[in-house]
Image (cartoon, rainbow, N blue to C red):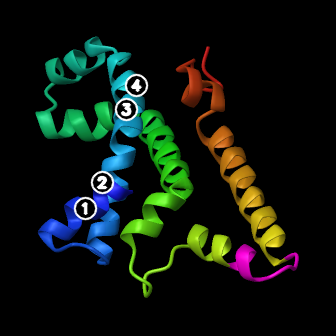
Amino acid sequence: GIAFLRFFSQIGLTGTFAGLVIAHVIVVIPFTMRMVLSNAGSLDASVESAAESLGAGPLTTFRRITLPMLVPGLAAGWLLAFITSFDELTMTTFIASPQTVTLPVRMFNYIQDNIDPLVAAVSAALIGVAVLVMVILDRLFGLDRLLVGGEQKGSS
């Protein structure tokens, strides 16, 4: 957080929403790239070759073959990026302006000033949303395919 604060103050992005977004993107890119590249490394190139040999152009091959095979890695990368970004309280505290308050910062400030169960209720709601997203991902792709790269549900 301090390194971002120092760098952004030199280029004039301190306290801006753009600076906050750039900092979060820089922090989550390694996690996301790892998930997507691991998924891309396991793609079967013969499927793309088959599509091209049947007359599909490069754009059609990407849109109808490659992209659907990358969706599990993209979804897992997005989910990991969101969780990591949501957890970055310290960096956000250094980078964000007082007018730009994220939910984790607001929850932290609320805990410092108040003693009531509101933060516990918000946390329970966030856990419920996370469970709902995991159930939806399991129904759509199968968690084994997303997390370990196994076969898609229903295929043999």
Q: Identify the secondary structure beneath mark 3.
A: helix
How many residues crowd around disc 1 within 10 Å: few (fewer than 14), some, or many (20 or more)?
Answer: some
Q: Are marks 3 and 4 in contact (CB under 8 Å)?
A: yes
Q: Given this view, does label 1 or label 3 mark the residue nearer the observer? A: 1
| Residue type (three-letter) at the residue carrying disc 1 | Arg
Residue drawn at the location 41% of the way across and 67% of the way down: 94
* Depicted 14 relative to depicted 88: above or below: below
How many residues crowd around disc 4 within 10 Å: few (fewer than 14), some, or many (20 or more)?
Answer: many
Which residue does the numbered mark 3 point to in the structure image? 36
Q: Are marks 3 and 2 in contact (CB under 8 Å)?
A: no
Q: Nearer the viewer, residue 117 or 8?
A: 8
Q: Earlier in the sequence, mark 2 or mark 4?
A: 2
Q: Earlier in the sequence, mark 1 or mark 4?
A: 1
State the CA–CA distance, disc 2 to disc 4: 32 Å
* Residue 156 image position (x, y, % from top left): 62, 13
Q: Are marks 1 and 4 in contact (CB under 8 Å)?
A: no
Q: Identify the secondary structure beneath mark 4.
A: helix
Q: Given this view, does label 3 or label 2 mark the residue nearer the observer? A: 2
Q: Given this view, does label 2 or label 4 mark the residue nearer the observer? A: 2
| Residue type (three-letter) at the residue carrying disc 3 | Val
